[in-house]
Image (cartoon, rainbow, N blue to C red):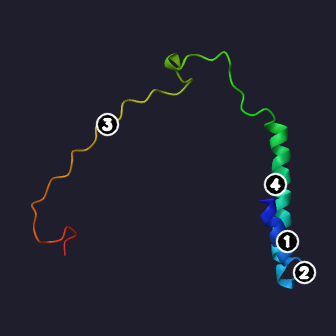
Amino acid sequence: AEFYVNKILVAERNKDSGKPHVAWCKALKELAMALKAYVKKYHATGPSWNMQGVDLKSYKPAGGIASAAAPPPPPPPERRSRSRRPPWGL
């Protein structure tokens, strides 16, 4: 992303009409740096895994009520007799 931001900066830097583009590019860079600092601070080691977890077959989610089975699908649509009339009713 920085490559394309730099291309925009080079192309628009000395133009009067390029001021909004330059401001946007600077804001994008600041956002990327802030996101990088946030990730380093709060997600330094990546997701945490429970190495002493249970087998998937014996797993039961905590809390909540187990939902009932889904209802059966609706019956298939009735077949219409073939006619020269188009199906959209014209």
71 with respect to 63 (left or right): left
- Which quadrant of the rendered structure holds the C terminus? bottom left
Which quadrant of the view contains residue 67?
Answer: top left
Q: Amino acid at mark 4?
A: Ala
Marks 3 and 4, the one that precedes in the sequence: 4
Q: How far apart in space, not on screen, are marks 2 and 1 (Cα)?
A: 9 Å
Marks 2 and 1, the one that precedes in the sequence: 1
Q: Which residue is mark 4?
A: 32
48 with respect to 25 (left or right): left
Check whether the beta carbons of the residues at disc 3 and disc 2 lie within 8 A of each other: no
48 with respect to 63 (left or right): right
Determine which of the numbered discs, if any, sits on residue 77 in the image: none
Q: Amino acid at mark 1?
A: Leu
Q: Which residue is mark 2?
A: 14
Q: Amino acid at mark 3?
A: Pro
Q: Position of residue 73 (x, y in %)?
A: 28, 41
Q: How far apart in space, not on screen, are marks 1 and 4 (Cα)?
A: 16 Å
- Residue 26, placed above or below residue 42: below
Which is more foreground, mark 1 or mark 3? 1
Q: Position of residue 21 (x, y in %)?
A: 81, 74
Q: Position of residue 79 (x, y in %)?
A: 14, 55
Determine which of the numbered discs, if any, sits on residue 9 in the image: 1
Check whether the beta carbons of the residues at disc 1 and disc 3 lie within 8 A of each other: no
Check whether the beta carbons of the residues at disc 4 and disc 2 lie within 8 A of each other: no
Q: Amino acid at mark 2?
A: Asn
Which is more foreground, mark 3 or mark 4? 4
- Residue 20, placed above or below residue 60: below
Q: Which residue is mark 3?
A: 71
Q: How far apart in space, not on screen, are marks 4 and 2 (Cα)?
A: 24 Å
